[in-house]
Amino acid sequence: MVLLLAMLLAVQGIWPLAAQAPATAPATAPATGPASATVPVPAARPPDTARPIAGRLAEWTQTLDGYAGSLAGGNLPPGELASIRPIIDVMRSAAETAKLRLKALAVEKQGLLDAMGPAPAPGAPEAMAIAAQRAQLGQELAADLDQLKQLDVVSARAQALIDRIDKLQQQQLAQELGHRGPSPFDGTSWGSAGPQLVDLLGSLVAAPAEWVAGIAQAHRDRLGSLFLSWLAFIILAVVAIAVGRMVRHRFGRRRGAAPDGRTQLYAAAIVDMLVKTALPMALLQSFHVLLVSQGMAIGLLGALIAGGAHAASMVLFYLGLVDFAISPSRPAWRLYPLVPANARRVRRRVRALVVLVFVEMWLRYGFGGDYMIDRELEALVFSLVGLMVAGILFGLTDPTLWRRDGTADDEKPVSSLALFMLWVLRVLLIVVGLALLSGFQPFARFVLSGAIRSYALLFAYGAVRHIGRDAIGLLTTSRRTGLIWLRRSLGFAEDMRIARLWLGWLLDCLLFTTMVMSLLLFWGVPGAIIGDRLRDLLFGFSIGDIKLSLIDVLAAVCVVALFVLLTNAIKRWLQDTVMPQTRLDPGVQNSIVAGSGYVGYVLAAMFGFSALGLNLSNLAIIAGALSLGIGFGLQNIVNNFVSGLILLIERPIKVGDWVVVGTTEGTVRSISVRATEVETFRRASLIIPNSEFISKQVMNWTHRSKQGRADVRLGVAYGSDIDQVRDLLLQVYRDHPDIAAYPAPSVLLEDFGDSALMFVVRGFVDNVERRSAIESELRFAIYKTFNAAGIEMPFPQRVVTVRHDGPPPSPQLPG
């Protein structure tokens, strides 16, 4: 999208405010007293923990006094303010660190005094050693408390000065943005700039001869070493370019070929970016460093050559980004699928922008220092360059230019969000143009730079997020052996949808946080303020009496996640490796595995609370305060939780048992702390609260063992030989392979029925889970045996007589 174009110009320092001083301003600050008096400013350094705190307190107090006097005048330049703030921040951090050390020492000494007990009453005897030690500890504790108060004062004063500096920087920025320079329509300004241009042209004509003469004079005795240095650089550059071309030919984007998946697409784009952009940039920067280090960047020509090398490296970066994203000459390798004609149009316009940027950067770097042009002329030049850049950029905000390949003309060219950003950029460019025409060059610089960098950042955010999401998808769906083993070891499901969701959220959080901080930087918020707020967020901020720290929260989350993953790994190891080798029944195995999981989760919670810095005694108080609410509102949940613990400990039922609870009959599949899953014989899963198994009657067919009894009830006709019936029934039971020989089967004459003699046959089976099938097989065999023996199995017969006392019904004639 248009964010690609914005990213091309989003490099720190393309159009900095003209009034901004370099960050390396002199590190001095006026002391209290006359305005002309100055005291040396100490360099920012880490706190010296070896020195006594009293000496550092005196130094910090003196330095803060000097800075307070400097800020009282309110006329320090921006560069000096920027150099003072980090020094004060270092002092404040050192004071806070010293406070933590002193507090620990004070707590230790107070503990020793408490261990000694209260001082005896006046006149009461006490050992001289104990009295002397008590007095010494008391004096040291009082001195520590006094130094703590002084450190509090130093920290508070440093924070007040930091706030004052931040306010002054904001005021100076506002003044600079409101400064009005010459307008491009002002003929007087151009008239005064004419002589400067003539002088510059004359300097440019004489620059080559001056440069050669200067080098010959400055390096007369080391021309040979200069020649060898540049020869080595040329050889290294040639070798690097040759190797880069081979790597690009092997792994880069090839003309006429298509990528084999998203992985090759991204890998080839990165290889091309490194070889075609990063490598030439490194060579140009090396050329710039070598030129400066060898003392050859002398005179106007030397400055122009060095500045041109630096500007050219930035231009290569911009062009490389265009090729990286839209690849105009290789449509199949585009990360953003633009219409081919539009991709070429974008490249042409971006090249025009790059030329303007190169000219602006080259002049700024080349004419810097001793060759700094007049600020009025600089403002006029920037007005012309800025108007041309704004015009080209305005043309690139055409929504039809960013239509995806294959999109019809009557369809929406871009998304609603992208269209909104295009119009916002157009409005900002119009504001920039009006500001430049009115002479407000600093404001135009600020708006144009902020807008371009913001859109560049949004483009970078979208690109990195898109690539990151693809990488997460590859890691979570790849069928490679190593990734599959890693996913199984961590206990993730095969599709890893939850893992993709969490990893995607984590990526979005990191990218969004980075984007917000960068946007604040782009729009004038000092980096020191952002660093302070970020430090407060990471290392602790107070809300009432509660102190929160993002670092502690992240540490607690990491600890809990680590223990949960370790617990899951241990559970799988027990379930898959250890338990199958034991002779324990499946119920005991399930209880051991589940118990190890609960222990691991409890340890994870405890260590998480410890990493978060929470006091478990406070949690006990909170739990006591919530007990009433738990008793009324969560009693069912607590009841089921306790019942689940009882089931796991007493084990009246276990996984694999055949149970009957009320009208529910089935096999126990899992027991958790809240509910138990029972699978019926029709393969329906019933989730039953654990309290049902504790408070109600439960029939467990397989509680002690799987042995059970198969009973068959039947009736035979009166007059049958009951001894023959008994022998035949026993023979049927003995012939069945699943009927146990001991206890032996038995036949009982249960009752004399209305139309039959009622018998009951009983036999024991080793697996009661097959009881229904065995009883059915026995009935089949009994029916066949009785038919062969001629034994009748009667059934009740009824004779129904219908009486009618009235006249007979009249006959119905047909039709």
Image (spheres, rainbow, N blue to C red):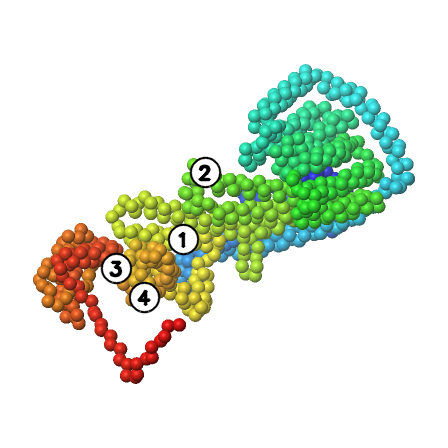
How far apart marks 2 and 1 lie (CA) works out to: 31 Å
The image quadrant of residue 293 is: top right
Q: Earlier in the sequence, mark 2 or mark 1?
A: 2
Question: Between marks 4 and 1, how big is the CA–CA gap?
Answer: 34 Å
Q: Residue at x 76, y 48 (%)?
A: 427
Quick check: 180 above or below 673?
A: above
Q: Residues within 10 Å of mark 2 (few under 14, many from 20)?
A: few
Which circle, 2 or 4, is nearer the viewer?
A: 4
Callout 4: SS: loop
Circle 3: element type: loop
Amino acid type of the residue tagged 2 in the rendering: Arg
What residue is disc 1 on? 601
Front one among 531 and 218: 531
Q: Which residue is mark 4?
A: 662
Would residue 645 be found to the left or right of residue 449 on screen? left
Q: Determine which of the numbered discs, if any, sits on residue 479 in the image.
A: 2
Distance between the Cα atoms at labels 3 and 4? 14 Å
**Of all residues shown, which one is farthest toward the bottom?**
806
Q: CA distance from mark 1 to mark 3?
A: 33 Å
Amino acid found under the numbered disc labelled 4: Gly
Q: Is residue 534 left or right of residue 138?
A: right
- Label number found at residue 701: 3
Asked whether the residues under the numbered discs 3 and 4 touch, taking CB atoms below 8 Å apart as contact, a structural biologist would say no
Foreground mark, 1 or 3, reads 3
Label 3 sits on what residue type?
Trp
Q: Earlier in the sequence, mark 1 or mark 3?
A: 1
Q: Nearer the viewer, residue 617 or 112?
A: 617
- Tag nearer the camera, 4 or 1: 4
